[in-house]
């Protein structure tokens, strides 16, 4: 690619101190060079955001929301360019990349509508209590490589609308779409309000521990999330952590097995299984277990696994070499322990391709069942009793999301109430909506992203408690 990508610091697009190559996971060929910031550029970006904060936070909500809408419009205008670049650096099929870009504009538009108005808590005789919310200052946004665009917009929308400024740092293997967004933001936003720096995992600690960072909005693995939290501790910084998951699907015996297989396959394999809320364990009632296994195996065999830029591809490569090696290890262990229904063999070709693999009958303590695979390899497990399956679903350090599938919606909702997770979907999957809060329980996260609760995380609530002056 001929295009040159630049960092965004104080409204100016600048070269990095050095650079590194970003690879296409389908070919392992270079997509483009990414500018790499040094410590001085990180400090400049934070200083620029800090300097921009007083004027930006003094603007009205309406004014700031208008900027956010302009960002959404500009992103939509260049949707095809963004989608192609996203497929090239991330690997997902082009139609899924388009979906991510369009979804990103929806997120920005939803936040442009949201407000955090003053709330009257009490008005009682002479006593008035109000809750009033103010922005925090400079937000560090740190994003992973599975949805590099929309996960940034989940943070940028509420950050800007509430009057904060941002320094964003994308993942080293998918920085290019963030830099392309920086290019359009440079034309729209006042200098310093939004800054982008890139690294190869060296600057995260310096960013999160910097005294001028007021809040860290982080999406990534639980291991890194824990480091972010530790790094924020000294400054008692606000953190929102959206971390890993090992989401269970519970399929009741009243669901037609072919219908259940189609829903679970889609929920497990979209984005090559690299979704925090992908179905990562499927528990299927014994009465339909074998038929479900046969149906889901057929779907896996029919999947078209190839370079996501080609027409008709349904599953692209895993995003990077490290993740490929991790999924490969889990797959090899599962193949040795379980019954392979589909996939299981790695192709001999360039790129990080793993065919959709379905493994039945693994023990509950198999690594593929207990760990977050974050790849297109799904364990299918049998259950007979609801109490047992709920206990098994909850027997995890994670609690991000889950699904329950049944023709009896009320019974499914009762099961959903017992699943310890931030979100449980009934008879649907991935119904993430920018107006609804999304959060993880246990080691899946802290705080909410999206929705009014997500907006509030970018503000400090002040309680103002007033009475008439007593003159006696
Ligand atoms: P990761 O934790 O390796 O990296 C995430 C980001 O953190 C990257 O930008 C990385 O450069 C940065 N980073 C690395 N070290 C850092 C440090 N010491 N301090 C600060 N930042 C640092 O995660 P990943 O492998 O890119 O993403 C996959 C993980 O993200 C999976 O576990 C997945 O479940 C999770 N995820 C969660 C959600 C959610 O909303 N809960 C969404 C998507 C992905």
Image: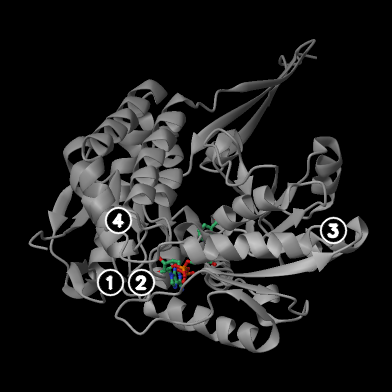
Dot 1: what SS? helix
Question: Is mark 2 in CB contact (under 8 Å) with mark 1?
Answer: yes
Image coords of residue 438 (percent x, y): 61, 45
Q: Residue at x 33, y 35 (%)?
A: 56
Residue mark closest to the camera, 4 vs 3: 3
How far apart are the alpha carbons under marks 3 and 2?
52 Å
Q: Report the residue marked by disc 3.
A: 287
Q: Report the residue marked by disc 2.
A: 203
**Residue at the far top in the pictured view:** 125
**As drawn, 430 above or below 28:** above
Image coords of residue 327 (percent x, y): 52, 78
Mark 2 lies within 8 Å of ligand 1 (Cβ measured): yes
Q: Residues within 10 Å of mark 1 (few under 14, many from 20)?
A: some
The disc at residue 39 is 1
Q: Residues within 10 Å of mark 4 (few under 14, many from 20)?
A: many
Quarter of the image with the N terminus in it: bottom left
| Quarter occupied by residue 321 | bottom left
| Quarter occupied by residue 107 | top left
How far apart are the alpha carbons under marks 3 and 1?
59 Å
Q: Report the residue marked by disc 4.
A: 86
How far apart are the alpha carbons under marks 1 and 4?
27 Å
Question: Is mark 4 in CB contact (under 8 Å) with mark 2?
Answer: no
Residue mark closest to the camera, 2 vs 1: 2
Q: Residues within 10 Å of mark 2 (few under 14, many from 20)?
A: some
Image coords of residue 426 (percent x, y): 72, 42
Dot 4: what SS? helix
| Residue 402 appears in the picture as rendered | yes
Residue 279 falls left or right of residue 424: left
Ranked by sequence position, the earlier of labels 3 and 2 is 2
How far apart are the alpha carbons under marks 2 and 1?
7 Å
């Amino acid at each position: 690619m001929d295009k040159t990508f630049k960092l965004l610091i104080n409204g100016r697009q600048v070269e990095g101190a050095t650079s590194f190559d970003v690879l296409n996971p389908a070919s392992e060929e270079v997509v483009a060079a990414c500018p790499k910031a040094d410590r001085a550029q990180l400090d400049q970006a934070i200083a620029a955001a800090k300097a921009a904060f007083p004027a930006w936070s003094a603007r009205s909500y309406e004014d700031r929301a208008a900027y956010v809408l302009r960002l959404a419009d500009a992103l939509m205008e260049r949707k095809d360019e963004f989608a192609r670049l996203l497929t090239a650096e991330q690997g997902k099929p082009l139609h899924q990349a388009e979906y991510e870009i369009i979804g990103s504009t929806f997120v920005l538009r939803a936040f442009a509508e949201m407000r955090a108005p003053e709330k009257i808590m009490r008005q009682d005789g002479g006593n008035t209590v109000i809750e009033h919310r103010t922005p925090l200052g400079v937000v560090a946004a740190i994003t992973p490589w599975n949805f590099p665009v929309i996960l940034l917009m989940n943070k940028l929308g509420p950050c800007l609308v509430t009057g904060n400024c941002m320094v964003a740092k994308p993942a080293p293997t998918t920085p290019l779409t963030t830099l392309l967004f920086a290019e359009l933001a440079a034309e729209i936003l006042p200098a310093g309000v939004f800054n982008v720096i890139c690294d190869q995992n060296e600057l995260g600690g310096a960013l999160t521990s910097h005294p001028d960072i007021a809040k860290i909005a982080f999406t990534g693995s639980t291991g890194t999330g824990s480091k972010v939290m530790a790094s924020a501790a000294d400054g008692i910084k606000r953190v929102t952590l959206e971390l890993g998951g090992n989401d269970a699907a519970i399929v009741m015996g009243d669901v037609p097995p072919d219908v259940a297989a189609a829903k679970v396959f889609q929920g497990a394999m979209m984005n090559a299984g690299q979704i925090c809320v992908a179905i990562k364990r499927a528990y299927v009632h014994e009465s339909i277990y074998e038929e479900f296994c046969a149906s889901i195996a057929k779907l896996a065999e029919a999947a078209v696994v190839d370079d996501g830029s080609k027409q008709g591809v349904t599953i692209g490569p895993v995003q990077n070499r490290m993740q490929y090696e991790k999924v490969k290890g889990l797959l090899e262990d599962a193949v040795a322990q379980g019954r392979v229904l589909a996939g299981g063999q790695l192709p001999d070709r360039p790129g990080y391709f793993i065919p959709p693999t379905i493994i039945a009958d693994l023990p509950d303590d198999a690594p593929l069942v207990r760990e977050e695979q974050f790849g297109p390899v799904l364990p299918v497990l049998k259950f007979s009793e609801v109490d047992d399956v709920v206990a098994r679903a909850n027997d995890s350090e994670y609690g991000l999301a889950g699904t329950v599938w049944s023709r009896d919606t009320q019974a499914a909702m009762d099961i959903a109430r017992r699943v310890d997770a931030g979100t449980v979907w009934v008879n649907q999957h991935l119904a993430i909506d920018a107006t609804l809060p999304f959060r993880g329980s246990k080691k899946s996260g802290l705080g909410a992203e999206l929705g009014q609760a997500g907006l509030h995380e970018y503000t400090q609530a002040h309680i103002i408690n007033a009475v008439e002056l007593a003159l006696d």
